[in-house]
Image (spheres, rainbow, N blue to C red):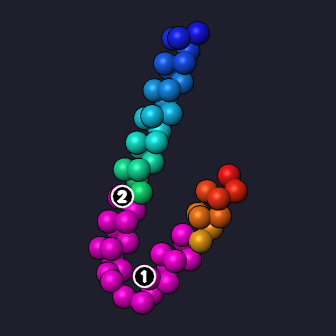
Amino acid sequence: MDRTFLKSSSIVTIMTFLSRILGLVRDYFVARYFGANDLTDAFLVAFRIPNFLRRLFG
């Protein structure tokens, strides 16, 4: 049981870390290609609302 738990925990840890890295890469490219303007702000707000609801109810 300890081996299964360790393997499962490792997979979750690696996937969480990978998700955070990919989010950082996404933010880098959004900032690089769109810059800081009203359109980018609207995109980020529109993206965060569903994400917030998913975290709230998920």
Residue 25 locus on image (x, y percent): 35, 58
Depicted 21 relative to depicted 25: above or below:
above
First reached walking from the N terminus: tag 2 or tag 1: 2
> From this viewpoint, which residue is outermost toward the right?
57
Q: Secondary structure at mark 1?
A: helix
Residue 47 appears left or right of 56 = left
Of 52 and 35, the residue lying toward us = 52
What amino acid is at disc 1?
A: Thr
Q: Residue at x 42, y 57 (%)?
A: 23
Q: Residue at x 42, y 82 (%)?
A: 40
Which numbered dot is residue 40?
Answer: 1
Which numbered dot is residue 24?
Answer: 2
- The quadrant where residue 37 appears: bottom left
Residue 13 locus on image (x, y percent): 45, 34
Residue extent of the magenta highlight = 24-48
What amino acid is at disc 2?
A: Leu
Q: Secondary structure at mark 2?
A: helix
